[in-house]
Every structure is written in structure tokens, then in C-alpha cells.
Amino acid sequence: MKNEEFAAPDEESSFFIPHSSFKKLMTGLVIKNTGSWYIVRTDDGRDVECKVKGNFRLKGIRSTNPVAVGDRVRIVENREGTAFITEIKDRKNYIIRRASNLSKQSHIIAANLDQCMLVVTVNHPETSTTFIDRFLATAEAYRIPVLLLFNKTDLYDEDDRRYLDGLIHLYTTIGYPCLKVSATQGQGLDEVKAKLRGRITLFSGHSGVGKSTLINAILPGTKARTGEISQAHDKGMHTTTFSEMYPVDDAGGYLIDTPGIKGFGTFDMEREEIGHYFPEIFEASADCRYGNCTHRHEPGCAVLKAVEENRISQSRYASYLSMLEDKEESKYREAY
């Protein structure tokens, strides 16, 4: 214990604090990001406000936020009571997207996840299949299971319900579980609660899809901020400003609430890898004539044949092409 309490940060830290100026080293979990500050829940149960000193950066990742909610970190607290994050422990995975206004930088949404729940609405506002597919491909890249939550089912008319059933058929056929939920009516909430137990789960989706309302219904007392839909554009307005983890149970379960995402620019994917993250395209590509087939115009392309025969959906194929274009143009495209 003597070494833990009075050892200096290691040489890989981005800054150095003299022995005489700090009093304790601790490890913990980043449970909230408030911009310039982070809340770290230490292993002994304290919630400590921490800063990131200077130009702290992760090796190999150009990110707007080097520290993410869900990170396991080491912190040092000086004798004045100010705490600093000095080290990020190795991550098992993370969800990352291209920073919307900085095409060469990324934004890490959350780290060390057991699963994701993507909240989707087919109206009020509509979540595009492009957005869904980009999120799913990113999760596939890091082998993070995704459950699609189709929210606001109580608001849909007959056409909306028909489209909803079509989407559920599409994604369940590919292998993604789907659940109809209504935060206001309570539909599907017990199933969601059961899947949260003992797991670290990312809640994500567009602004206005009802993430915070769902969280308040699932975990009463969290008081996640909710907002109204912009009537002019039928789009959500941001209410959750920063990411935060809410404890679900005593078995290590946490739910991560994140700000609503307008677009999902993919990051950290090679052009030739993109097809690997669409399971049905990857499966069909085994029969392509050429090993480096891009599935756009090559003769003997099994993927194009599958699209023509409706074994791969047009919407999924369009999403694949849009991600290829991202890589070729090297620019951010907002999912509409």
C-alpha cells in the first residue's frame, strides 16, 4: 500500500508531478464528462472531480476527447485536493466516430462496453437507415453487440407501423435483435431492464428519439434531461450535453447516456475492411470472382448479384457505398 499511496506517475504520463506535491494515487472509472472536468468513481467508492493536465494524448488516436466515459484510469490527487488523470488503462473496445467539424479527428463516444442499445424512431423524428447502418458497422468493427430499440411506438400511424415492421424484419434477418418500446406507455421496458443487468451498456441515437425519457422510465431517479421536438424540422434538440454513466444494479451494470448524434461519420476503418462490417455483404463476398472486389462494378461480383436478387437490401447496400465514398473523399458526411 505504501507504494500505491506515494508513488509518482510513470514515465508514460503526459506530465510530471513532483513527489512533494501529491498525496495519493488511485484507480477508478470515468463516469461523467463535463467538458474540461471528468468525474471518476474510485475503487473505494469516492466520486472525484479530475482534470486532464496539459496536452494529454492517447498514442495512435487523434481524438477531440482523449479520455472517455467508461475508461478505467489512474488519478493522482495533490495536497491541495486537485486531482489529475495520469493514465488510461487499456481499453477492450470503444465506439468512435469522426468529429463532425474536424475531418482528421475522432470523437470517442464511450469505452469498455459490453453492449450498445441504439434508440431508433421511424417518425418524430425519423432515423435514417444510413445512420443505423453506420452505427452498426462501427460496433461490428469492435465486436460490440447491438440491440435496436424502436421507440415511440405509441405515436405511429398505420404507414409508420408498416415501415417499422419492415425494418425489424430486415435487421433481425441480418442478425441484429430488435425490440419495440414506448417510454410513455411502458412497452418493452421490462425486457430492456433485464438486458441491462450486470452489463455496461451504451445508449445512443439521434437527438429527439427519446433516450433520456427511456432512461428515466427504466431507472427512476436518474433525472436525465428531456426535451421537446422542433416542430419546424421534426428533429430533436440537444438536452444531454455530456456523457454520463448511471448505475443499474449492484452487479456492475451501468447505462451510459450520451448527447444525441446528428451524423455518424465513420473513423478508423480501412476502405477494404468496410464490407467486413456488413455481415450479409461479407458472407456473400466469399463467392466474388476477385479477392479485392469493391462490390460496385466488378464482373463476377456475388454481392451485386445478391442485391439484384434482393438477398441484400438496397438500403444496406446504399449505406455500404456511402461509407466507401467517405474513405475515397476523406471527408465527413452527415447521415440525413
Image (spheres, rainbow, N blue to C red):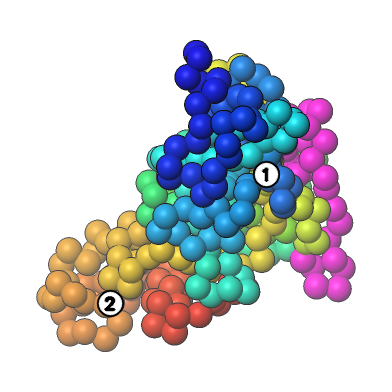
Which mark, residue 134? none
Compared with 262, 75 (above or below) is above
Q: What's the residue at 50%, 73% (across, down)?
A: 104
Residue type at the position of mark 2? His
Q: Position of residue 59 (x, y in %)?
A: 42, 55
Q: Label 2 vs label 1: CA separation?
A: 47 Å
Instruction: Give neighbour class at mark 1: few <14, some 14-19, many 20+ (Cα, 10 Å).
Output: some
Pick out the residue farthest to the top: 1
Q: Which residues are magenta?
A: 212-235
Tell whether position 302 is magenta: no
For the C terminus, give its image quadrant.
bottom right
Q: Position of residue 44 (x, y in %)?
A: 61, 17
Q: Is residue 138 shown to the viewer in this render?
A: no
Residue type at the position of mark 1? Lys
Secondary structure of residue under mark 2: loop
Judge by depth and name the residue closer to the eye, 218 or 104.
Answer: 104
Q: Position of residue 211 (x, y in %)?
A: 71, 47
Q: What's the residue at 66%, 66% (across, down)?
A: 262
Q: Is residue 332 shown to the viewer in this render?
A: yes
Which mark, residue 295? 2
Tell whether position 224 is magenta: yes
Q: What's the residue at 17%, 84% (across, down)?
A: 299
Instruction: Name the residue tied to disc 1.
Output: 51
Instruction: Give neighbour class at mark 2: few <14, some 14-19, many 20+ (Cα, 10 Å).
Output: many
Q: What's the residue at 72%, 52% (across, down)?
A: 35
**Is residue 11 found left or right of 299 in the rendered image?**
right
Compared with 38, 54 (above or below) is below
**Is residue 100 found left or right of 308 in the rendered image?**
right
Indicate which label's residue lies in the foreground, 2 or 1.
1
Residue 28 location, quadrant: top right
Pointer 2 or 1: first along the chain: 1
Q: Position of residue 264 (x, y in %)?
A: 56, 65
